Image: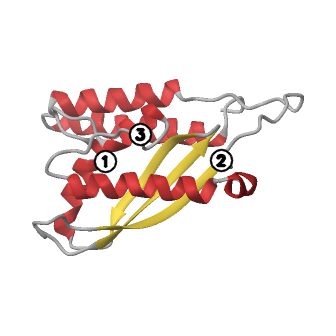
Amino acid sequence: MEEYTQSSWAVLSLRLNDAKELLETAANETVEQQTVDKAVENLNLAVAQLEKKKSDQEEEVKTKYIDGTYEVSVPCKPDEDEDFTEYQLSMKVTIRNDKIVSITDVSGDGDAANDSYIKKAANGTSSKKGVVSQIITKGMPEEIDTVSRATCSSNAIIDGCKKALEMALRPEETEAQ
């Protein structure tokens, strides 16, 4: 752990705990293959994103965004069907080297019935990748496919990531725009 950045190690630790919980569950009951596949995908992604700490001699690279974890809250608005009441969706977005590398603690303050939609939007379904893994893979919330039957929650997660990027923008970048 000493040689890796705290944030990349934290993401890996989280994914390892998820995998451990899944294995413990599988010991007592049947777990769907797609659930196992998703855990493996998340674990592999965390390993791939492990980042070594910079030595003191390395030059600081000028980035557009300030590295850090940003807590954001955005409205999740219903579409034209108005199947639910608007609520606030909160999450933590970690930005490093001008890329989004982690999206955690995604939750809503509305009706508990929204939780399944938030989870579906974040984690995806058997046939569709969740918006969280799409954004982390691309590093930006651009050209992200929403998860059908969780479109509003998907859009709110994307909006939350955009808000985090706005918060992380270096002051000189703000003035240049």
Between the C-alphas of marks 3 and 2, the distance is 16 Å
Mark 1 → mark 2, Cα distance in angstroms: 23 Å
> Please, what secondary structure does the residue beneath circle 3 have?
helix
Residue at image location 58% in from the left, 37% down from the top: 8
Q: Quadrant of the N terminus?
A: top right
Q: Are marks 3 and 2 in contact (CB under 8 Å)?
A: no
For the view shown, which residue lies furthest in the right direction?
Answer: 57
Residue 152: image quadrant is bottom left
User: Residue 55 is drawn in which quadrant?
Assistant: top right
Q: Earlier in the sequence, mark 3 or mark 2?
A: 2
In primary-sequence order, the first of circles 3 and 1 is 1
- Secondary element under disc 2, as helix, strand or loop, is loop
Residue depicted at 19% across the width and 56% down the height: 116
Looking at the image, residue 2 sits to the left or right of residue 22; the answer is right
Above or below 32: residue 103: below
Q: Is residue 19 left or right of residue 11?
A: left
**Residue plotted at (22% across, 48% down):** 120
- Going by the numbered disc 3, the residue's amino acid type is Ile
Could you give the CA–CA distance between mark 3 and mark 1, rounded to whole angstroms?
10 Å
Residue type, mark 1 in image: Ala
Q: Identify residue for label 3.
A: 135
Amino acid type of the residue tagged 2 in the rendering:
Tyr
Residue 4 x %, y %: 67, 31
Residue 138, image x, y percentages: 45, 33
Which comes sooner in the sequence, label 1 or label 2?
Answer: 2
Marks 3 & 1, CB-CB < 8 Å contact: no
Residue labelled with disc 2? 65
Residue tagged 1: 122
Which label belongs to residue 22?
Answer: none
18 lies left or right of 38: right
Res. 84 image quadrant? bottom left
